[in-house]
Image (cartoon, helix red, strand yellow):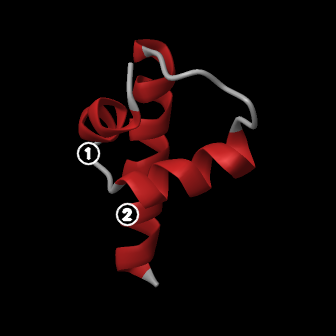
Amino acid sequence: MELAEFARLVNAPAKWVLNALAVLEPGARYSDALARRLAVTRAIHLDRKSVV
């Protein structure tokens, strides 16, 4: 899977995906399972951002 497809699955910009993976999962390969986990991370991130 390529970055663009992975970012679409996560519903996030490619740069956000790259930055998040660098911190949370260094060296990880793009997969459906990782996309699901990162999508949850993104949703929490956006929710916390709207509260602050």
Residue 4 picture location, percent across and down: 30, 39
Q: Going from the N terminus, do you reach mark 1 or mark 2 first?
A: 1
Q: Residue at x 48, y 37 (%)?
A: 38
Residue at 46 percent across and 68 percent down: it is 48
Residue 38 as seen in the image, left or right of residue 21: left
Q: Which numbered marker is on residue 11?
A: 1
The one nearer the camera, 41 or 48, is: 41
| Res. 44 visible in picture | no
Q: How many marks?
A: 2
Amino acid, disc 2:
Asp
Residue closer to the observer: 19 or 51:
19
Tell me residue 1's x, y (percent): 38, 18
Front residue of this view, candidates 6 and 46: 6
Seen in the image, is 46 located left or right of residue 31?
A: left
Does the CB distance between marks 1 and 2 fall below 8 Å? Answer: no
Residue found at the very far bottom of the displayed protein = 52
45, above or below 18, in the image? below
Element carrying mark 1: loop
Give the farthest residue toward the front. 2
Inspect the image, locate mark 1, and give the three-letter code of the amino acid beneath it: Asn
Is 37 situated above or below 49?
above
Q: Position of residue 47 (x, y in %)?
A: 37, 63
The crowd level at tag 1 (other Cα within 10 Å; few <14, some 14-19, many 20+) is some
- Residue 6 occupies which quadrant of the picture? top left
User: Which quadrant would residue 10 be assigned to in this image?
Assistant: top left
The answer to whether any part of residue 14 appears in the image is yes
Q: Residue at x 43, y 75 (%)?
A: 49
Rounded to the nearest angstrom, the CA distance separating label 1 from label 2 is 14 Å
SS class of the residue under badge 2? helix
The residue wearing badge 2 is 47
